[in-house]
Image (cartoon, rainbow, N blue to C red):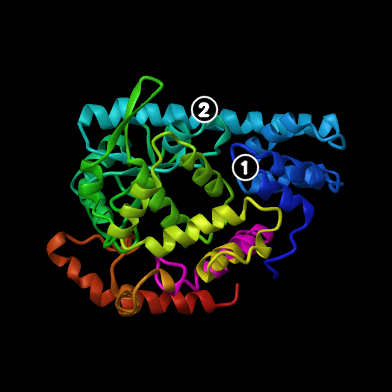
Amino acid sequence: MSSSALEPSLQLVLLLTRLELSAAQERAVLALCSRIDDWFQVAQQAEQRFVLPLIYRHLCQLAPKNLPPEQLEGMRCQCLAIVQYNLCLADAQRQLVQELLDPLEIPHLFFKGRALAARYYDEPAMRFCRDIDLLVPHERIVELLEAALTQGYTPYWPRNLAPDRASLTFAARVRTVITLLSPQGIQIEIHKQIDKAGTIYDSAELVANAEALWVDDIEMSVMPSAELFVYACLHHTRHRWSHLHWLADLDAMQRSPDFDLAEVRACARRRNLTATLEASLELYQACAMLEPWRNETISDHGKALVEACLINLQGAREVEVFLRNGNPTPDFAFAWQTSLPHRLWWRIRGWVSPLQPSYSDYESWPLRPCYQWLYLLSRPFRGLIKRLNSREPQ
């Protein structure tokens, strides 16, 4: 799959993935619009990449002559459905704070999603939010899970998570993320760390340094802008910039009055993420052009992100998953993002990880804590049986 020469509809969606357009960008957009024959395809591509409300707003403002009114009305109806879902998610987040986090006095941190949209977007409803990401100190996760499961929340992953304290304690120990469904049906990802390795960020430090954000009379704890911007670059690069609303996030955050690039760069240096940050900034700048793949002024690292983004833009989720499976470590998509010792450490850890117990081990053979070391002995055999069963003809 080529990373260059995007079809006009994808070029249009990519160029419109920002809150505001310059005069030159508006002219380029209108020129692209004149080449569009299938506006349904434009709407479909924008929706799949989570930027349809943003694209709809720009098209309403620019009013290209060849955009049929019925196609624009169709986009409006799709956007209303997205806004309705976002309102449902906002209600779930409000309930989570008012009925669980505040009464239990659980320190926490909301990151990405609606908290980001509410802080940086002029119209937060334009930013599609699929779920709620919540960081909670490891020692408080079981308490939160117990309370949530008695108030109408249900397990989503692990699907068969049992509500007793022993099961929850084991799950919280072996998993970095536990996902619940709210009473509204919204996924809530409860994290004990925000990076895969747990070596880049200290969860306790992040929660302690959180800032207060008031949204609809609800106080939520969020990351400082510089910290969030650097984390966004790390997370989205790991996923090879497969969703365009992540590019819109960079645009929205950089337009914020409290955005300070010098502070962002200082934060990246502290986290050893300077290469990731600078390449992400180059990606953002390149995607402001009509033909990002022709930008010869950016570094090889920036070109790598542009190529990854454009390949994902032309493919389905399977493309992103395939590419991500080739990441040198779970946190980094490219070797240049990290050091050789870190990559070697993860390779060794990869050899050991199949021996580590999972919640499925506990589910099929619940053991008291003093006997759970037996999972280290049983897990290789369980893995072998699972592999043999998967090879049996269906």
Vertical position of residue 146 compared to residue 158: above or below: above
Q: Nearer the viewer, residue 261 or 333?
A: 261
- State the image quarter where residue 298 is shown: bottom right
The residue sitting at the top extreme is 217
- The residue under the point 46% across, 68% down is 333
Vertical position of residue 334 compared to residue 10: above or below: below
Image location of residue 3, percent across then percent down: 67, 67
- The residue under the point 53% across, 61% down is 240
Q: Which mark is residue 87?
A: 2
Horizontally, is 82 left or right of 102 in the view?
A: right
Residue that numbered label 1 is attached to = 51
Instruction: Identify the magenta region.
Output: 308-335
- The residue under the point 32% across, 80% down is 344
Q: Is residue 332 magenta?
A: yes
Please state, as top left, top right, bottom left or bottom right, where the N terminus lies in the image: bottom right
Q: Is residue 285 magenta?
A: no
Whether residue 157 is visible here, answered yes or no, is no
**Amino acid type indicated by mark 2:** Leu
Q: Mark 2 or mark 1: name the one nearer the start of the chain.
A: 1
Secondary structure type for disc 1: loop
Q: Nearer the viewer, residue 56 or 131?
A: 56
Circle 2 or circle 1, nearest the eye: 1
Secondary structure type for disc 2: helix
Whether residue 297 is visible here, answered yes or no, is yes
Horizontally, is 169 left or right of 393 in the view?
A: left
Residue count near mark 1 (Cα–Cα under 10 Å), binned few <14, some 14–19, many ≥20: many
Image location of residue 120, percent across then percent down: 46, 35
